Amino acid sequence: MRFLEWGSVAARGIIGVTAVVLAGGPHDELAARTPGAPNKAFVAIGGMALVERTIRALRSSASIARIIAVAPEKVHGHPALALADECRPDGARIRESLRNGLGGLPASADVLVSTSDLPVLTAASIDDFVMRALEKNADLVYGCLEKRTHMAKYPKVPHTWAPLRDGTYCGTGFVTIKPRVLPSLDRFIEQLGHARKNPLHLAKLFGWDVLLRFAVRRLSIADAEARASRIIGAPVRAAISPYAEIGVNVDRVSDIALAEELVNGATPSV
């Protein structure tokens, strides 16, 4: 089966990309559920840390050539990170961790950036997303999941949904980034952090027309792509995945029990 999947990937000209797994962050109430876990990436689900489940799935993917784990330095020797090719220190903020993970990589290379809390991730879902993202030929590709796709497979797993003209969507644990766009993306993340609780500042950042169209469900994916590209100053696209697995993560304490249920009897293997 893996030979057939590799043949499909190779036939489309994908030799293998670098994956950066973001496993930083503070000790929180999720991490408190697993003794010794520095943050939620190391919470045990079915006897295996979330970050290890994520890395194992990436390692089994034909489209991933290299894995960089970004995590607290004190855990760089942790068994959960053993399958990563390299460990780099995290930062106080996500944009600092992202900068550390992308540092030194070719400016125009497509890099898969993944969260570390994807308990049911599969090789097929990774290969599919990478192929879709590379086909977009954009500096940043944001993974999206349609509500009906998710509900058909994981109806018990909650999400925050965005109603658009094309359908109802949520984000996923995947984006692809060309490192050359990081400086402008870094500025945007900082601006968004300052504006997120202020409607007037959000309007200045995104534009009143975008916010109004979103409010009345008339904003399309193409509209959102165009405005994001304008703000960042580089091509931004959305890739809609048919695999609900890339959207199942662990954000709340209540998600731990759900994740345990999902992986019961299905421990991933390399």
Image: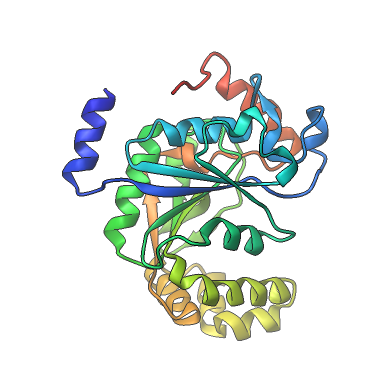
Colour scheme of this structure image?
rainbow
Visible residue check, residue 219: no
Q: Nearer the viewer, residue 97 or 220?
A: 97
**In the rendered view, would you say 155 is above or below 183?**
above
Q: Nearer the viewer, residue 161 or 181?
A: 181
Q: Nearer the viewer, residue 138 or 252?
A: 138
Residue 48 figure quarter: top right
**In the rendered view, would you say 249 is above or below 144?**
above
Residue 8 figure quarter: top left
The percent coordinates of residue 14 (x first, y second) are: 25, 48
The percent coordinates of residue 24 (x first, y second) are: 68, 48
Farthest residue in the top direction?
265
At 53% from the left and 62% from the top, the residue drawn is 103
**In the rendered view, would you say 93 is above or below 192?**
above
Indicate the quadrant containing the C terminus: top left, top right, bottom left or bottom right.
Answer: top left
Residue 206 figure quarter: bottom right
Instruction: Answer with left or right where residue 59 lies relative to residue 75.
Output: left
Q: How many marks?
A: 0
Indicate the quadrant containing the N terminus: top left, top right, bottom left or bottom right.
Answer: top left
The percent coordinates of residue 254 (x first, y second) are: 73, 34
Instruction: Answer with left or right where residue 231 lies relative to residue 250.
Output: left
At 30% from the left and 64% from the top, the residue drawn is 137
The percent coordinates of residue 59 (x first, y second) are: 43, 33
**In the rendered view, would you say 226 is above or below 61?**
below
Visible residue check, residue 45: yes
At 47% from the left and 36% from the top, the residue drawn is 245
